[in-house]
Amino acid sequence: MRNGVMMQYFEWNLPDNGKFWKQLKEDAVHLQEIGVTSVWIPPACKASAGIKDTGYGIYDLYDLGEFNQKNTIRTKYGTKNELIEAIDELHKYQISVYFDAVMNHKAGADYTEKFLVKEVDPNNREHPISDAYEIEGWTGFDFKGRGNKYSDFKWHWYHFSGTDYNQANNKTAIYQIQGEGKKWAEGVDGENGNYDYLMFADIDFDNPDVVTEMKKWGQWVAKELKLDGMRLDAIKHINDSYIEHFLDAVRAEKGNEFYAVGEYWKRDINELNAYLSSVKYKVDLFDVPLHYNMYQASEQGESYDMRNLLKDTLVAVHPEVAVTFVDNHDSQWGSSLQSQVKSWFKPLAYALITLMEKGYPCIFYGDYYSMGDKKSPHRLIIDILLAARKKYAYGQQVDYFDHPSTVGFVRMGDELLPGSGLAFLMTNGKKGNKIMNLGTKRKGEVWYEFTGNIHEEVTIDENGNGNFSVEGGNIAVWVKKEDKKN
Ligand code: CA
C-alpha cells in the first residue's frame, strides 16, 4: 500500500485487565483517521504466566484465549472472541492485522520428563561442560484444558533441542538435549557459539514432526483469525530454512501477499544482509541498525554527526524489505534490549521514518499513547507527521545530508496529487537553515511550516530554490500553502 504505516499496538507494561482487544476494536476508526494501515498485535496465545504474561512465554499455540488453561480462559489482552471482533473491526477500516508469532520456544509445560542432556558453556554452546546425564525437565505438553481441539499434537522432550532447568536438583543451566541426530540448529546467529537456545524449552526444527505441526499451526491461525501477516519473533534463534519453508506454507494457503516481518535483533548490517540472502528475501526485517543510530544520536546530542544517521542501515541498503521504527517493547526503558531513544530526539526520529521515501514505518504504541501509566508526550507530533505523510510525502527524494548538525531532504511531489511534495529539515544543533531545490516549475510558490514550529513563509525563487529554516534541536516540515479560493 502506498505510504502505508504500521503501528506496533502494544508496549511491555500494559495492564493485565483483559480489556485490550476491546480497546483495539474501539480504536479502529481512529487508527484509520490518522493514517495507520496495519497493526502488529501482541502475542495472542496462552502463555505460561496466564493473564500476567505478555505472551512471549508461550504455552499453547492453539489457545487464543478460548480454553481454561494456566488458570484463565482469556489472555492478558482478552478472549479469542474479543480478538476476532477487533480484527473484524480493523478490516472494516482497511487496516491489516499482523500476528506476533512466537515459534522459538515453549514455556509452562504440563509435566516433567526424564531425558539425557549435556550442560554447555553459556558463552559457547558448542562446548559441552559435562558428560551426558539424565535430568528431569519441563518438556511434556498435553494441553488438558484444550484436549485435541484444532490439533492432537502433544509435545515431548525429543521435540526440543534444549532447556534450562532440572527439576530433580533445582539446577539452572543450559542443557543440550541428547539423542539420535540431536544438535543445535544450523542457520541461526553465531553469537555464543550458536544462538539456537534463547529461553524455556527450545523448539527443535530439525524434527520433521515439529516442522509439520508448526506449518499446520501457521496455516490454521492465519485462517482462523483472517490474518494479513505476521511478525516473527526471535528469528535469529530459529533455523533460517525453517522460516523460509514456514512462510511458503502459510502463503500457499493465504496468498503471496501475506506479509511477514522478522525480529532479527542485530546492529551489524552485514549480518542482516546475510540473513536476508539465506531466506531469499521472503521476510522483511526491522531496521535495528537505524534504531541504534537514532539511539546513539539521541544520547550524544549536538556532538553526533547527523550525516551518519542512515549509514549502514537496512533502509539505506535494502529499502524494499526494511521496516523502520524508533522504539519497541524490547528497547523501551526497563526491557531486555533497553536502548530507548531519548525524548528530545523522538520528533526527529519519527519525522525521518514517516517522511522519507524508503522503508515501511512502524509507530510504537508506547510513543503514541503511553508506557505504563506514563502518557506519551509525542502523540501530537506523530499525528502531525502522519498527516504530512498522507498528504505531502510523495515523489522522488533528494537528500541534503551535507552538514554535521542540520540535515534533511525534499520530496518532489507527485503530479497526480496536487500540492504534494515537501522540504524536511532537522537539526541536533542550533537554529539552522538550508537552501533546497524543488524545481523551476515551483517558481513563485509560497511554502509554510506544517508542524507550526516556524511562522515565517518561504517563497520559491526562479531557480526553484527555497531558503528553509529549522529551530534548534527540532524539525521543520515545509509544504506548499494552499491557493486561496475566490
Ligand atoms: Ca531456537
Image: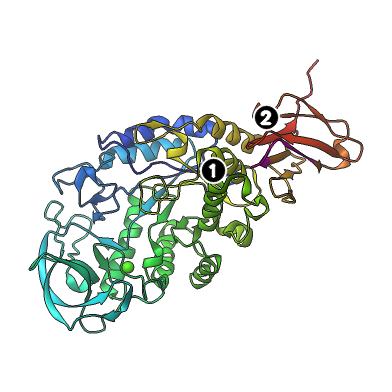
Residue at position x 55%, y 38% in the image: 344
* Residue where numbered disc 2 is placed: 450
Decide: is 23 above or below 350.
Answer: above
Q: Is residue 2 visible?
A: no
Residue 5, label in figure: 1
The residue range painted magenta reads 426-434
- How many labels, in total? 2
Residue 379 position, x and y percent, is 50, 31
Decide: is 261 above or below 436.
Answer: below
The kind of residue on which mark 2 rests is Phe
The residue furthest left is: 168
User: Which sits earlier in the primary sequence, circle 1 or circle 2?
Assistant: 1
Residue 278 position, x and y percent, is 49, 73
Q: Is residue 98 visible?
A: yes
Residue at position x 37%, y 67% in the image: 237
Determine whether, in the image, residue 427 is placed left or right of residue 28: right
Quadrant for the C terminus in the image: top right
Crowd rating for badge 1 (residues with CA inside 10 Å; few <14, some 14–19, many 20+):
many
The kind of residue on which mark 1 rests is Val
Instruction: Indicate yes or no whether the magenta region holds residue 443.
Output: no
Residue 413 position, x and y percent, is 74, 41
The residue furthest right is: 462
Which residue is nearer to you in this view: 427 or 150?
A: 427
Q: Quadrant of ligand 1?
A: bottom left
Image quarter of residue 463: top right
Q: Secondary structure at mark 2?
A: loop
Which residue is nearer to you in this view: 363 or 332?
A: 332
